[in-house]
Amino acid sequence: MKLQHLSYLSMIAICIATSQLFAESPAPPTGLTITDTPNDAGEACDLSWSMSPDDIFNPIRADEAEPNPETIVSAYLIERMTDDANGAEISEEDRTWRKVNEASAGSSTWTDRTVTPGWTYSYRITAVDNQKEHSEWCNGEASVTPSMQAFNWSKGWLAIFMLIFGGFVAYFINEARSGKKLWVRKIAGLVAIDEAVGRATEMGRPVLFVAGIQDINEIQTLAGLTVLSRVARTAAEYGAQIEVPTCRSLVMAAARETVEAAYLSAGRPDSYQPDRIHYLTDEQFAFVAGVTGYMVREEPAACVYMGGFYAESLILAETGNHIGAIQVAGTAMPSQLPFFVASCDYTLIGEEFFAASAYLSNDPLQIGSLKGQDYGKFVSVFILVVGIFFATLTNFSDADAKQGFAAQTLSFITDNMLGDAGLLPVSEGNTDDTGDDS
């Protein structure tokens, strides 16, 4: 019995060895090419190859019979070896072939982003079937040395747009500095400031100004202080008192300088009271409690909120609405704009807030920048309208026209001007896998 058992085991081992010996392997991929990835810092290599004939996703199999199930490709193994390290020492692991990626069936490209600039690499690829059988190795046509490019041409149109926008800004700044009056549309909220301060003067009540709860390094706070200069000057001219509670000590210092300069400009330096520009606390809701308490006690006739706000915006605006004050608000915080719109008489929405600071300051640098940005936006909208036109035209065209001028123009706008395909469209060349031009 033991001898018979051993003979059975021997026969099984012989069958397994024979099946492995005659097992079919998938056909190998071909044409492995390696190139340095363009428009980068030399930190990637692009690999491309022709899929194995046993890959069911290969286009050349479209008219063929059913594939051999034993040789269907399930993946591609890619190995890499370092040929030269640009003078550096190469580790033993990098001196030999080692796996760097396993691409799925149907893949014909891959980008290796683990390379070192200046090093030279060789690559090879093999197809693997479901039985883990490997095809013959396909070696790369040549080694590659990734290097950093001086220019990223995929961002060429971005550079052109930046030059155009910068040119507009520089031109209008120069025009403003030369004394030319640049037209800027009136903003209703700014016009209402004179009315609000005048009402406060007639009622003998103060004007409350809140420059947000952000620090001095935030652009919204700086824009709010510019509006504060206009409000303080109007208050000085009308003889009204202005109250400026702050949430940051540096903002308090800047606000005092701003209000003092406004009173000096109005010719009323004796009316300036620095104690009315004061610091409360850095804590958000403690600050709001202090401001709303002041609003309930003193009942200011006008409340101006200009700066960066968060959850406290609704509390401030509702309190001001409760005491019957004229309220003018402005912020670039999208989540807080609905509260100001619902509770305030006038609201500067988004870019209107920044435009207001330029409009009020009458600074040539700010006015010129504002006009330049407007013309830059006009160029952007024009390109958008052209793209929409050609997209609509292509959508309603027949199959032959979809490859015509409209489709090519739309592709150029989306891929080149708004994408990263480069300055000019690149011809795809012959991409037929069968080798003919059909």
Image (cartoon, grey):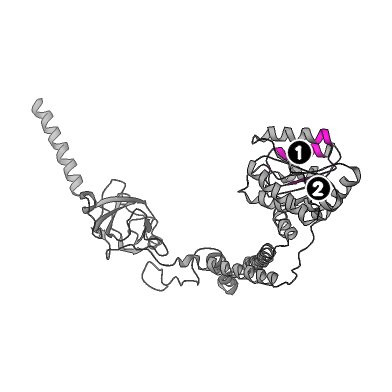
Three-letter amino acid code of the residue under disc 2? Ser
Given residues 38 and 249, the one toward you in this image is 249
Q: Is residue 379 above or below residue 138?
A: below
Q: Earlier in the sequence, mark 2 or mark 1?
A: 2
The structure residue drawn at horizontal position 81% and vertical position 39%, both measured from the top left corner, is 320
Nearest the viewer among 168 and 433 is: 168
Which residue has dot 1 on it? Answer: 316
Image spot of residue 290 (x, y percent): 73, 33
Q: Is residue 148 magenta?
A: no
Residue drawn at x 82%, y 33% as measured from the top left:
296
Distance between mark 2 and mark 1 Cα atoms = 27 Å
Packing grade of label 1 (10 A; few <14, some 14-19, many >=20) is many
Q: Residue furthest right?
A: 202
- Image position, residue 429 (x, y; %): 42, 72
Q: Secondary structure at mark 1?
A: helix
User: Label 2, on which residue?
Assistant: 271
Give the image location of residue 269, x and y in percent.
78, 51
* Position of residue 83 in the picture relative to residue 420 (left or right): left
In the image, which is nearer the foreground, mark 2 or mark 1?
2
Farthest-out residue, top = 1
Stretch in magenta:
295-320
Q: Is residue 306 magenta?
A: yes
Residue at the spot 71% in from the left edge and 51% down from the top edge: 258
- In this orientation, does residue 389 appear? no
Type of amino acid at the residue the image marks with label 1:
Leu
Quadrant showing the N terminus: top left
| Residue 430: x %, y % from top left | 41, 71
Q: Quadrant of residue 64?
A: bottom left
What mark, if any, has residue 6 been given in the picture?
none
Q: Nearer the viewer, residue 357 or 43?
A: 357
Secondary element type, mark 2: helix
